[in-house]
Amino acid sequence: MSTNITERTLEREKKTFINFCKAAEAFLIIMMTVSLIGIIMVFTIILFGAFGLTDDTEYSSKEFFFSGIGGAIGLVGVCITLNFAVKIFNRLKDGESPFRYDIADKIKGAGMALVGTGIFGAVLEFAGGILIGAGVLVENDMTSSLGLSDFMIWGALILAVSYVFNYGCKLQQESDETL
């Protein structure tokens, strides 16, 4: 009798997990769409400012151009990461073990995308510091910190999770071979 209850409980948990994966995938697709719209908006504002198509001096300044590029880079990194997350949940909703090499690879890809975005952002911040020092840019809220270095921290954490999943894949493979 206990085995029957355990099987029903496992089946219910599996259905709940599959439904969660479907909902997470849908939410991430919406977030990715919003991020893509944000990228288009930022590039449109940058282009309008760069070609002097706006009367607002804030949007036509060099500082806005510089911070707008940083914002666009951040949004591109978020879109790439969300794309990996959508693929992960798409694979998880089949109800099989989450410890598979393709899922570990997708987690690693998401981490690498965030680390790459953070590195690119750090280079952009460094270049901004040089331009501020040279007097080309004026230091203000737009140029002082783009916040892209946080991407490196989150990327490193996700990379660590990918290595845990990779180890879990090896354990899963050994368990499957033993049975």
Image (cartoon, helix red, strand yellow):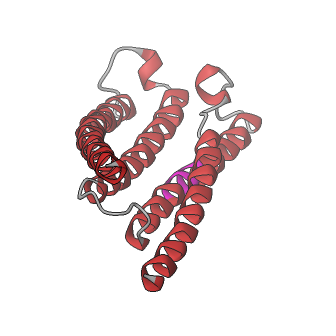
Is residue 124 in view from this perspective?
Answer: no
Which residue is depicted at the point 46% across and 62% down? 109
Up the image or down, 19 lies above or below 157; here it is above
Whether residue 76 sits left or right of residue 132 in the image: it is left
Closer to the camera, 7 or 126?
A: 7
Residue 114's x, y, as percent? 52, 51
Residue 35's x, y, as percent? 33, 36
Quadrant hosting residue 5? top left
Is residue 41 in view from this perspective?
Answer: yes
Tell me which secondary structure the magenta stretch mostly adopts. Answer: helix
Q: Residue furthest right?
A: 133
In the rendered image, the quadrant that contains the C terminus is bottom left
Which residue is depicted at the point 54% across and 73% down? 171
Q: Residue furthest top?
A: 56
Up the image or down, 25 lies above or below 49; here it is below
Closer to the camera, 57 or 3?
A: 3
Closer to the camera, 1 or 37?
A: 1
The residues colored magenta run 113-118
Up the image or down, 164 lies above or below 40; here it is below
Q: Residue furthest bottom?
A: 177
Say if the magenta span includes residue 117. Answer: yes
Say if the magenta span includes residue 62. Answer: no
Closer to the camera, 15 or 167?
A: 15
Which residue is depicted at the point 35% across and 27% down? 52
Quadrant hosting residue 88? bottom left
